[in-house]
Amino acid sequence: MSSSEIQIIKRNGKAEHFSIEKIKNAIRKAFLAAGSFATDEELTSILGRVHISSYMNVEEIQNQVEVALMAEKYYSVAKRYMLYRQQHSEDRDELDKLSFLIDYCNAENPATGSKFDANANVEQKNIATLIGELPKKNFIRLNRRLLTDRLKEMYGKEFSDKYLDLLNHHFIYKNDETSLANYCASITMYPWLLNGTSSIGGNSKAPTNLKSFCGGFVNMVFMVSSMLSGACATPEFLMYMNYFIGLEFGKDYYLKVDDVVDLSIRKRTLDKVICDYFEQIVYSINQPTGARNFQAVFWNIAYYDKFYFESLFGEFRFPDGSQPDWNSLSWLQKRFMKWFNKERTKTVLTFPVETMALLSENGDVKDKEYGDFTAEMYAEGHSFFTYMSDNADSLSSCCRLRNEIQDNGFSYTLGAGGVSTGSKSVLTINLNRCIQFANKRGMHYLTFLEEVVDLVHKVQLGYNENLKMLQEKGMLPLFDAGYINLNRQYMTIGVNGLVEAAEFLGIKINDNPKYAAFVQEVLGLIETYNKKYRDKNILFNCEMIPAENVGVKHAKWDREDGYIVTRDCYNSYFYAVEDNCLNILDKIRMHGEKYIKHLTGGSALHLNLEEHLNQPQYRQILKVAAKEGCNYFTFNIPNTICNECGHIDKRHLKECPNCHSKNVDYLTRIIGYMKRISNFSAARQNEAAQRYYENATVKEDCLKED
Amino acid sequence: MLKYTDYSIVFSEIPDEVTLAINLSNCPNKCKGCHSPWLMDDIGEELTNSALSNLIQKYEDEITCICFMGGDIDPKRVNELAQYIHDDWNQINVGWYSGKSENPDCISVKNFQYIKLGGYKEHLGGLNSPQTNQRLYKCLPNGEKVDITFKFQKKQL
């Protein structure tokens, strides 16, 4: 075979005719760089040691040239040749970045353009979002190195290699690897109330009045968020605001909100003054933020019914010794919700993500007034989460995670113990791949899964050690200042591909004993290990991750590697999103006690509806959720936003009711956040299109089940 | 005899209720433009008392209403089934979607909380159309029927 008939594989994977001249040129250049000259004779003897066969790749050939130069004792030329290769490899890295830069600029929207860790929480792509994208790859490498170095030290090289192997083969996924900061936290604001932001590196003093509270609060949330990779929850926001309103306008202010309290020519009523503060805070926090790659901060707040409030804040004292007042707080909670719902018809406001915490008892909401009010707000088209528990022993810290509360006590330095919680880091198991892999090997899937589950716990312990190291070096002032308690934060084990794994095993995805047993077996295994590795300084929980982009990646990777993959985005629920044979009651049941009991970190059920229900219907659904033990849910009814006139309507319409344009977009939730569907990544848009929005009318194509 | 093809949980058909709707087949009305024309065929399984009871038991604590969608082929049987539900599940309301314009004599209004009357007329539209000929009545315990069709008009949120 003549050399020109040989095909070699280029770096881009394409085949090309082999050319001996290219190798000769490279060797000649290396000789010149070393200050000498390659004769034809020398070239022949070097090339005599290089053996080319078809479909060899460029790297292999270059390796042979290196070895040949050394064997022929041209050491300084070999060094030059290696340097030349290294330089080219660096050039290629830059080229990669350049082409990414061009691709990103050309992408439809920022989420599709993002190569790593896409999320839709960015409205527009621009130079600031691009700046945020570029270093993501380096962060991933750095984070991996930090973690594997720690793992080597703790468990040895073999373990660390095993972790990398599972990670690289997509059995597991490390969430938020593009950020150095720990994940999400529900903070206590008491340290801020006492000392301002000085203890976390800011310069503002403790708030003393309503104005300084509202201004300082925004700054504080920005500072805290810049030290977290995920959400910042402030469960005490309205309670503190209520306190400052009371200081200024009297504890019974809510009884005289129509009084004019503004002496300026605007003559604002107290109600208007309060709503203006809402506006200042909410609009400020929804701004894109420089420190977070032009994303808004992820801000979450909570509302409480009377009983939840009493168990969380019954012992609470403000620094002046006074206790929070339920009646005025209740008024303020309701006022904020009503205001926010209305404001959302004017502008797309993603934050705060709100959660209503309700205590349940005997198959219903215990606080009937709040049950009725919650249903009323849903019926008015407001979109928020409900968290229901028969004991105020847990709280949702963000739009997806619930956390058990370790200590409901109160301290004069840290405030209410119950609100300080969150998740330090999430490490996710791809159940579909694990189970199919075990099956291929003729192994029982639980045997293989147990190995993986054990490993992820150890890895999380490694992560925790790194976090402790950062804290010792003074890098985590949120912990030092008491906003977050390191020992009350969870290490989270995520799961993805649960539905797909069950489907692979031939289990039907509906409420049936076989599926329930499978779910309990898999999640129960994780919970067993959560308990095994728990001690007084470390807590674990298990969450069905929302799979904002992980679900898409897992489906893609698994399909490429020959696993059975039936959809393009793995489910984030216990049911299949496209299944139109499951009704709303079935879905609630499938997120009920039977299925979620080992899911200690939770999973929010998103009930997708085509149309809004009315108040009595939502009220009945709350009862159903209480009865089934479905503790965390929301309703998604796509809101319509007109691309022509900007009108926002809470209903799912094909035509703008204002200007009758058919050029409309929809707002729905991507995981926790209300966003335009057109801002989702391309794959996520697909998933959203397949979501089954319950039509609320009789269905046509569902034959009755057995 | 009545046959049913499928069921679902609905919210739009009966206002304020969480309703288990049961689709009955062999519909004699043959309305032009019917949204479920396959229900004109004699398909599905017989809706016996025990079949109905099995369905209800699946959702009895979660629904507030059961509605028979169709059944004009045998209204007497619809009445019997309504009676059966009331005897055993007193807390659950019963509705009937009929395509007839008048209430058949064999239907005892006291067995129902909701009755919809009127065939589908394409040019007048369904219950949510302002011109509709169809009527949804709320049946009061004294046998009186109150027209609540206005509840279907979509309101601005």
Image (cartoon, rainbow, N blue to C red):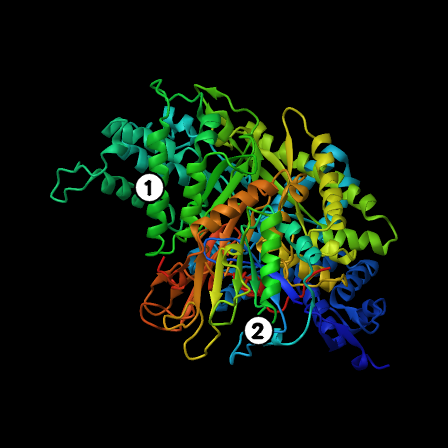
Q: Chain of mark 2?
A: B
Of badges 1 and 2, the one in the foreground is 2
**What x and y, as percent, mark residue A246?**
28, 28
Query: Can the viewer see residue A234?
Result: no
Residue at left offset 69%, top offset 38%? A459
Q: Of helix, strand and loop, which one carries label 2? A: loop
The reply to whether the C-beta atoms of the residues labelled 1 and 2 are less than 8 Å apart is no
The residue that label 1 is drawn on is A335
The residue that label 2 is drawn on is B36
Query: Which residue type does callout 2 highlight?
Result: Ser
| Quadrant in the rendering for residue A440 | bottom right
Query: Can the viewer see residue A658?
Result: yes
Taking A78 as reference, is A239 left or right? left
> Which quadrant of the rendered structure holds the N terminus of chain A?
bottom right
Q: Nearer the viewer, residue A235 or A325?
A: A325
Q: Of helix, strand and loop, which one carries label 1? A: helix
Residue at left offset 67%, top offset 66%? A703
Compute the Cα span from label 1 to label 2: 45 Å
Residue at left offset 78%, top offset 76%? A7
User: Please, is residue A691 above or below residue A356 in the view?
Assistant: below
Q: Nearer the viewer, residue A214 or A128?
A: A214
Query: Which residue type does callout 1 highlight?
Result: Arg
- Outermost residue toward the right in this view: A442
| Quadrant in the rendering for residue A449 | top right
- Outermost residue toward the left in this view: A265
